[in-house]
Image (cartoon, coloured by chain):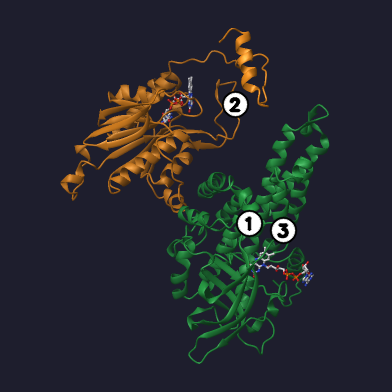
Chain colours: A orange, B green
Amino acid sequence: MSDNRRPGVPDGLDSLIMKIAVCVKQVPEATGQRKIDPSSKRLDRSGEGALNQYDVNAVEEALRIKEANGDQGEVVLISLGPESALDAMRKGLAMGADRAVLVSDAAAAGSDLVATSYALAQALARESADLILFGQQSNDSDGALLWAAVADRLKLPVISQAAELTIAGGKARAKRQTEFGYDVVEATLPAVVAVSDAINEPRYPSLKGIMGAKKKPQDILSLADIGAETGRAGEAGSRTEVLTLNAPPSRGSSQKIEDDGSAAEQILAFLVERKLV
Amino acid sequence: MDLGLSPEQREIQGLAREFAQAEIDPHAAAWDRECRFPAELFRKLGEVGLMGICVPEELGGAGAGFVAYVLALEELSRADAGVGVTVAVHTSAATLPIVAFGSAGQRERFVPPLARGETIGAFALTESDAGSDAASLRTRAARQDDGSWRIDGAKQWITNGGAAGTFILFARSDPQQPGARGISAFLLDAAHVRVDRHTEKLGLNSSSTVDVVLDGAEVPGDRLLHAEGRGFEVAMATLDGGRIGIAAQAVGIARAAYEVASAYALERRQFGQRIADFQAIQWKLADMATEIDAARLLVLRAAWRREQGLSHTVEGAQAKLFASEMARRQTAEAIQVLGGYGYTKEFPVERYYRDAKITEIYEGTSEIQRLVIARELLGLRERSPA
Ligand SMILES: Cc1cc2nc3c(=O)[nH]c(=O)nc-3n(C[C@H](O)[C@H](O)[C@H](O)COP(=O)(O)OP(=O)(O)OC[C@H]3O[C@@H](n4cnc5c(N)ncnc54)[C@H](O)[C@@H]3O)c2cc1C
Ligand SMILES: Cc1cc2nc3c(=O)[nH]c(=O)nc-3n(C[C@H](O)[C@H](O)[C@H](O)COP(=O)(O)OP(=O)(O)OC[C@H]3O[C@@H](n4cnc5c(N)ncnc54)[C@H](O)[C@@H]3O)c2cc1C
């Protein structure tokens, strides 16, 4: 954190001034139907794009941390994607983030998890942020993994499923959602934290924010700009190869029970009949 | 030619849509049933900036332009037409005329609270005997020796009247001049008017429509808006732009009806098939979608011309005429697609039908729009009615 010292800031506050990087992804608009492009065997991302919903939570959390610190510090949005991803990133800027860095390069198209995490780690290394926030998962590929891969590459601690986050004394402390309740986990900064949607209620971007977003720095960087080797990004750097795609098998005929007061009995009879209870 | 929206316009449209889905959709049916004006909603709309979309930044607005404004109005009206008209009257009938005709002092004092949604605005022209023929209004403003005004009279069906803090009110300042030329516009506070009656209506129940009385209201001299005797000019210019907003409201209502009808047609089964498989239903939906698009294009053209500073009297009147009649027709068709369910309060289409009707009446009836269009096109200029 010491590398973000600002002149003229009282000593006590200095440790609170943070640079927060938020990794965000443009995903197809939730209302549209998902289609696989048969020729590339990838998700058809040609329609309207939106900011991944979990990433909106991550941006909100970053802004709250900054606001709690007297609005000092910086929130930087980082993404890997086509140039159109800037449209989605602008929503984060409209909410209040300070600038956007988009890594966009023809040689990065077709990046799988391994290649994406490499490129993002390269971009993040240039920023040396105190805190790196991710959404828990993206609503198109639903990997819920990228933050782990990126943290591993940057050799930083990682906390996932964060439902509450506090930053104090150079540490990130998170309540981590589990099946049975909460774990409280602490990590020394800099750290990677992936947030769940329980962490906050994101604000609406304001109209002033929308109108002001175009004046905020928005950099589009190539792989060369972030010092990434082209062979390690895009299809060339991907370890996944999609061989064929099939529709999920049908689950067979289903039986629908309308509850007329006897639904519980009917379900019980169904389970008993199959010796499941 | 470019029919695309700018990134900001798309984002504002998206924000209005998102806001409407989360904050309005879940309550619209109850507000309608209870005839409830959702005062707290407008504070929230103000916080995100939707109460001053096209008001200049230096006066507290977002400075986003008239196209963005009508896009947002369509989204709000899709969720609740009453909310749509509240924002429309507040913005284009109350705030923008002060921006356009106000003195520097009036702009600085009245516009920022309106643009931020802290104060709601109203526009008071209509009287019991002066509707389409607004220039025959009788509310009287008498100049006092100290330069102030004393206003007596009554205004009818004033949208936002029950909640407004700023009224643009039209009164006859020169009793010797019976027509348009004897009228002046004034900026009034809530304390200047007495709300006499809340109007019961066919629809648009979440909007406030009231009669107000002026009992010798003492109005300081600096509340005269624009020059003395030129109030009717303010009214006509305001309605020129305001109509475009009402047209956008009509498009929003029709779109809401279309969305319910098309989803229903794909679900409802009769004679062993989805009713969407009957060509009769397909054609209804195809016509609905086509007419909604046509209306929206007329709205966007008029809004774009206004934003560019081009004339838009005919284009705005055409947009309102077509969009409002389309909305009345197509909300009725939506009920038809839903059959008996459409006529019940279990579905929102009957509300859309009731709400759509008003768009053919206020800010100039359809007959008056035809008259405006014909007079302009044929070069027959007479005294303009509202
Ligand atoms: C063979 C193959 C080819 C692919 N080609 C493409 C392609 O051309 N274009 C494409 O978009 N995807 C492509 N994908 C999908 C891509 O691999 C995943 O999007 C990526 O690995 C992230 O995984 P996820 O989306 O499941 O993220 P998750 O692990 O579910 O995401 C968690 C969080 O990571 C962050 N995040 C995710 N993706 C990004 C990103 N791109 N930039 C910044 N932050 C991010 C967000 O904070 C997100 O909430 C391809 C996948 C395969 C297997
Ligand atoms: C819900 C609601 C909200 C309103 N909000 C406001 C508001 O905020 N501020 C405000 O000032 N007013 C408001 N009004 C009033 C509205 O603008 C008037 O109702 C409208 O201008 C029509 O006037 P009228 O009702 O007196 O009808 P009339 O003028 O009496 O018209 C009756 C019929 O005669 C037709 N007609 C009239 N003149 C002609 C002509 N020259 N040629 C052909 N046909 C003609 C009309 O088209 C109509 O069909 C509101 C009204 C309602 C119902």
Instruction: Tell me which chain the residue with mark 2 is part of.
Output: A
Say whether disc 1 or disc 3 marks the residue closer to the N-terminus.
Answer: 1
Residue at x-position 72% and y-position 32% = B267
Dividing the picture into quadrants, the one containing residue B259 is top right
Give how far apart the Cα atoms at labels 3 and 2 are: 45 Å
Q: Quick check: which quadrant has ligand 1?
A: top left
Task: Say which residue label 2 marks.
Answer: A35
Instruction: Tell me which chain the residue with mark 1 is part of.
Output: B
Circle 2 or circle 1, nearest the eye = 1
Dividing the picture into quadrants, the one containing residue B368 is bottom right
Mark 1 beta carbon near ligand 2 (under 8 Å) = no
Give how far apart the Cα atoms at labels 1 and 3 are: 11 Å
Name the mark on residue A238.
Answer: none
In the rendered structure, the answer to whether residue A231 lies left or right of residue A187 reads: right
In the rendered structure, the answer to whether residue B130 lies left or right of residue A72 reads: right
Residue at x-position 52% and y-position 59% = B54
Give how far apart the Cα atoms at labels 2 and 1 are: 44 Å
Examine the rendering and report whether any part of residue B2 can be seen: no
Circle 1 or circle 3, nearest the eye = 1
Which amino acid is tagged 2? Answer: Lys
In the rendered structure, the answer to whether residue B364 lies left or right of residue B231 reads: right
Q: Does the residue at mark 3 contact the one at mark 2 (Cβ under 8 Å)? A: no
Task: Say which residue label 1 marks.
Answer: B35
Task: Say which residue label 3 marks.
Answer: B202
Above-or-below relation of B153 to B358: below
Examine the rendering and report whether any part of residue A7 can be seen: yes
Which amino acid is tagged 3? Answer: Leu
Which amino acid is tagged 1? Answer: Cys
Mark 2 vs mark 1: tell me if same chain. Answer: no
Could you say whether the residue bearing mark 3 is in a helix, strand or loop? loop
Residue situated in front as seen by the camera: B52 or A36: B52
In the rendered structure, the answer to whether residue B27 lies left or right of residue B247 reads: left
